[in-house]
Image (tube, rainbow, N blue to C red):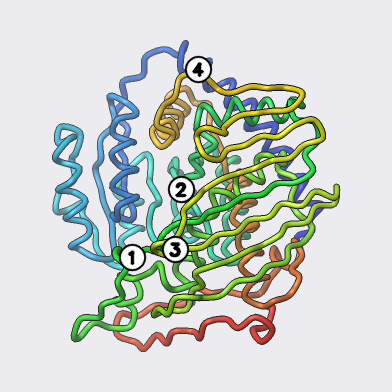
Amino acid sequence: MISRRDFLKDSSAATVGGLIATSALGHAAENSAPNNRILKVGLIGCGGRGTGAASQALKADPNVRLTAMADVFADRLQSSLATLKKFAAAKIDVTEATSFVGLDAFQKVIDSGVDVVLLTSTPAFRPQHLKAAIAAGKHVFCEKPVAVDGAGVRSVLESAAEAKRKNLSVMSGFCWRYDLRMRETVAKVHAGAIGDIRAIIATYHTGSLTTKFPGTRNPGQTDLEWQLRNWYNFTWLSGDHLVEQAIHNVDKIAWLMKQEMPTQVVGVGGRSVPAYGNTFDNFSVAYEYASGVRATLSCRQHDGAYNEVTDYVTGTKGIFSNGRLATQGISGETNWKYTGPQRDMYQVEHDELFAAIRADKPVNDGVNMAHSTLMAIMGRMAAYTGQVVTWNQALNSKEALVPATLDWKAPLAVTPRAIPGQTKLI
């Protein structure tokens, strides 16, 4: 069993290591000797986020080439490739022989001779793909979330440790940590600009994704294909929207709390708008910390409703607001608002990843990305079951949402939607 104390110990080490790595990376990027070796990149998961990540990787370094791609569906791979060729044809060396389709396509990309893999498939498969990439000695960009259950998080922690032993970079898709304004603001909060944090209120209120995932089932489509093409509405594939989308707020909470993990969480949730699948469309969770801090997060996906994605942090000496543009900044004993340069945080992630590889100064977000993912998972567990869920319960949970084996033709029943008070905590 992994204890919360062991996890916090790893967290502290990761935070210090991350600060050192960021400092060293900036120095290396400015002062390292030229390195013109072509870095071969493989894309695993060719949806919209994967296509975006590939485009950012190709912009990050003049000597990067996309040489292999994988997806479970050929049409998605070809659509992604066509899009990428429109702006970066000279940097794309993908051929028919390096275009892999199917449930085992990820391994074929990893084995194709690439140096870096971009893991942007459905979240359910992230632990398996990360494990295979690190085992093969590849640098990794790993989108969020990194797992959908405790078993997956434990696997990711093992892979992160293995990456550290092998001197490999693991860059996470928690993009706000690469936003210049947020970096400087969080640094000021950590330096005491609002005093000691006493409460955090976060919201992730957006519209639904029914247009992107309408749930239409074509004649002859198997259970597995239908679910994979509409993965967002199935908990085993997405983790539900608290884990897949609102996790950005969860990650900012973890960051603001200097990677202190909550002792427990309580939550509510459900579905207001009928839909296929088994996910909720609203959650409200409250994380409790040993220090007495409370961090609450509400998220919902309802069309036609007021939208807001915010973070409000109350301290003993002031407030930090990451809400609407007019209220962004720090107020109280210290009044401050970021006025420095701003860059696309998605691009910064890849710029720093490839700079780290060139300079042989690995960046490893592995522990932090596992922390934030588990925080989101424990919130979902609390809302699904209606029970208090402790950190240790979530970390050591025997729940395994992802089927051990998948078959295109075999039946794959949809698990009934959770009912708080009836669904059991595993």
- Is disc 4 surrounded by few (<14), some (14 to 19) or many (20+) residues within 10 Å? some
First-in-chain label (3 vs 1): 1
Residue 370 is marked as none
Q: Which residue is mark 1?
A: 104
**Residue 28 has which mark?**
4
Q: Which residue is mark 3?
A: 125
Question: Could you tell me residue 26's position as x and y percent?
Answer: 52, 19
Residue 294: give x, y in percent of width and height.
77, 52
Q: Quadrant of residue 395?
A: bottom right
Residue toward you, 388 or 87: 388
Identify the residue shown where x is 53% and y is 74%: 401
Drawn side of residue 355 relative to residue 216, left or right: right
Query: Where is 116 relative to 23, above or below?
Result: below
For the point 68% across and 36% down, which residue is it? 15
Give the Cα separation between the discs numbered 4 and 1: 37 Å
Q: Are marks 2 and 3 in contact (CB under 8 Å)?
A: no
Task: For the residues labelled 1 and 2, say whether their Cβ atoms are less than 8 Å apart.
Answer: no
Q: Secondary structure at mark 2?
A: strand
Residue under numbered circle 2:
142
The alpha-carbon separation of the residues under discs 3 and 1 comes to 11 Å
User: Which residue is farthest right?
Assistant: 291
| Mark 1 Cα shell of 10 Å, populated few (<14), some (14-19), many (≥20) | few
Mark 3 closeness class: few <14, some 14–19, many ≥20 residues within 10 Å: many
Q: Earlier in the sequence, mark 2 or mark 3?
A: 3
